[in-house]
Amino acid sequence: MRIATIHGYATSTVKHRSLEGWRLLLAVPESPDLAPQIVLDSLGAAIGQRVLISSDGSEARKIVKDERSPARWSVMGIIDPERDLNVG
Amino acid sequence: MGTVIGRVTLSVRHPRYVGERLMLTLPWNRDTLNGEQIHDPAIVVYDELGAGVGDKIAISEGREAACPFEKPCPVDAYCAALVDEHFYKK
């Protein structure tokens, strides 16, 4: 999984049927080695929030309930702002 | 995200690629998002949605790219959506 910040969203009318009705957010990972990703969001993450994203497609397919979905990155959780400062 | 810049046609091909649309696409990186004409190196994306040159598309890379196909097939980048608009706040 990666930590990323939501910087926006993408709208699409022509897309794989499994993505119908799902929010597609624009997540910019904090580690520079990974390019910005369009992520499937089922948790209602907002722009500016830090989230945990996963590239486990099987999880994304469970969310959209379609075993043929090409969905890969999805939001696994929204990181609490206060608690993530006291590290260890 | 990526921008379609062309199409790849194959006369000799893997049997699974018969009748396919393979679009040459420039994947976006942070600079692209900030409005610069800089992209990651081009990749070829399998498209079933009718993406055209200049279209913004959402790309699914890796194993998930082969999920939409009944038979296992050698696709590792798939066009999951034609992006109408994208909103980006720095």
Image (spheres, coloured by chain):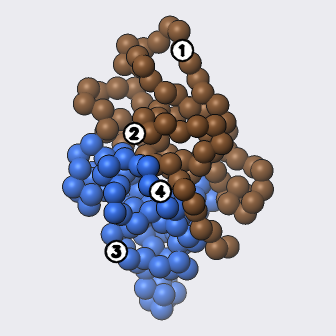
Chain colours: A blue, B brown
Residue B45 position, x and y percent, is 52, 35
Please name whichever residue, B49 or A62, is drawn nearer the observer in this view of the structure: B49
User: Which residue bears the numbered disc 4?
Assistant: A12
x 59%, y 49%: residue = B56
Please name whichever residue, B85 or B22, is drawn nearer the observer in this view of the structure: B85
**Residue B68 vs residue B27: left or right?**
left
Q: Chain letter of disc 4?
A: A
Quick one: SS at disc 4?
loop
How many C-alpha atoms fall within 10 Å of the one at disc 1: few (<14), some, or many (≥20)? few
Looking at the picture, which amino acid does disc 3 mark? Leu
User: Which residue bears the numbered disc 1?
Assistant: B10
- Nearer the viewer's eye, disc 3 or disc 4? 4
Looking at the picture, which amino acid does disc 1 mark? Leu
For the view shown, which residue lies furthest in the right direction? Answer: B36
If you read the primary sequence from the N terminus, does the residue marked by circle 3 or circle 4 appear first? 4
How many C-alpha atoms fall within 10 Å of the one at disc 2: few (<14), some, or many (≥20)? many
In this rendering, the answer to whether B19 lies above or below A80 is: above
User: Which residue bears the numbered disc 3?
Assistant: A43
Quick one: SS at disc 2?
helix
Q: Are marks 2 and 4 in contact (CB under 8 Å)?
A: no
User: Which residue bears the numbered disc 2?
Assistant: B65
Mark 2–mark 4 Cα distance, whole angstroms, equals: 18 Å
Quick one: SS at disc 3?
loop
